[in-house]
Image (cartoon, rainbow, N blue to C red):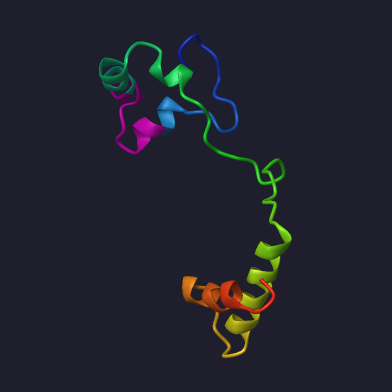
Amino acid sequence: MLPGGEEPAAGRIDPDALRAIGIGYYGVRAATEQTFGSGALESAPDRRVSTDRAPKPRFTPDAKRCLEAALRVTVEPHHKRLEPGHLLPGAAAPGR
């Protein structure tokens, strides 16, 4: 049960589950409120972002060309990751 007698919903904290692994929910809550003020946990923003609502990055045409060139430089020698050094040839490519 949560404060106020409500049941924990999906994604909410379950004090009994925390207690089962040795974490005292009410102790953590009291220490947090003592440090950050009363109601600090209620006013904290939810920082989890749902991937279906996440904004897609927008790139200028020049940035897209730079990334395309960097991808070509990355794939040619069979590198597995795009590293900062791969961006340099794309940024220095003619026509930029």
Percent coordinates x, y for residue 95 in the rendering: 69, 75
Q: Nearer the viewer, residue 19 or 56?
A: 56
Q: Is residue 82 left or right of residue 38?
A: right
Residue at the image position 45 percent from the left and 13 percent from the top? 3
Residue at the image position 70 percent from the left and 57 percent from the top? 60
- Looking at the picture, does residue 94 appear above or below residue 19? below
Could one spot residue 81 in this view of the protein?
Answer: no
Provide the residue span drawn in magenta.
18-28
Q: Quadrant of residue 37?
A: top left
Q: Nearer the viewer, residue 39 or 11?
A: 39
Could one spot residue 52 in this view of the protein?
Answer: yes
- Looking at the picture, does residue 54 appear above or below residue 15? below
Residue at the image position 68 percent from the left and 64 percent from the top? 62
Total marks in image? 0
Percent coordinates x, y for residue 84 in the rendering: 48, 70
Percent coordinates x, y for residue 93 in the rendering: 62, 78
- Outermost residue on the bottom side: it is 77
